[in-house]
Amino acid sequence: VKDGIKAAKLVMEHSEHTLLVGEKATAFAISMGLPGPTNLSSPESIEKWEKWKQNHCQPNFWKNVDPVGKCGPYHPINLASVEVEGSVKNEVVGSQGGLCQGYFESDNLLEPIKSNLKVVNRHNHDTISMAVIDKMGHIAVGTSTNGATFKIPGRVGDGPIPGSSSYGDDEVGACGATGDGDIMMRFLPCYQVVESMRQGMDPRDAATDAISRIARKYPDFIGAVFAVNKEGVHAGACHGWTFQYSVRNSSMQDVEVITVYP
């Protein structure tokens, strides 16, 4: 189903559930009148996928699996610590026994073995979050995304998680977020932004606080939020990249693009 926002609204309006996922979510959307099933692959995305396969499925989002640098099928591995000349080395032991990829040095015995992941950027990331305040003061928010490029099939990102990519409350304001959704969804940054504004923070401080909470735990993460209160005052905050969001109201002739620096 192509129109994810309409599908989400149908779940809200015609079921008692919060989330529907997978093939049955598609079946639900089609039964509610949306066109489908639809092939959402473009020539560009197919070309990227073919090049990725030729590059041994690198980068990807697997960790602590064998094989490390190739396409699957993947199997879990165990890390067996051994002492070598007074320093700690970690052997990578496959689920069937034997060394999978030799051993590696690490100061942290729990350091995961990962593939060569790309950073989040405009070339592999396309989340759009929006917030709208109508003339009656009602607030609506929504998020649309294809998810992370080369994600593991079955992944659920931050887009559909209430309070993560977007959140709104008529009494307070709204928030939208984008970035490394697998990290950000653990903190519900947009819920945090709106609740901080409820407690008296202005939009700028609320946005900065939400991003700072994530950065303290994950200093290398990349992400951003925008915040707007019910009066229309807005601001943004980001970490790890320069972020832009756009604004328009009834008194403006055109859209204004706001640049936010980390």
Image (spheres, rainbow, N blue to C red):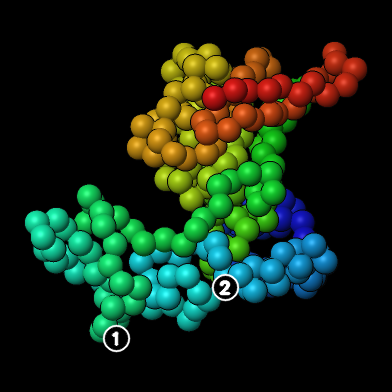
171 sits left or right of 209 in the view: right
Q: Amino acid at mark 2?
A: His
The mark found on residue 56 in the picture is 2
Quadrant where the image shows the N terminus: bottom right
Q: Residue at x 42, y 75 (%)?
A: 67
Q: Residue at x 60, y 40 (%)?
A: 178
Mark 1 highlights which residue? 96
SS at mark 2? Answer: loop
Measuring from the top left, give residue 212's x and y in whole percent.
42, 27
Q: Residues within 10 Å of mark 2 (few under 14, many from 20)?
A: some
| 98, above or below 124, in the image | below
Q: Amino acid at mark 1?
A: Gln
Measuring from the top left, give residue 135's x and y in whole percent.
78, 22
Residue extending farthest right: 253
166 sits left or right of 113 in the view: right
| 44, above or below 160, in the image | below
Q: Earlier in the sequence, mark 2 or mark 1?
A: 2
Asked where in the image residue 253 lies, by quadrant, the reply is: top right
Q: Residue at x 76, y 24 (%)?
A: 257
Comparing 59 with 249, the one in front is 59
Asked where in the image residue 92 lies, by quadrant, the reply is: bottom left
Asked where in the image residue 175 lies, by quadrant, the reply is: top right
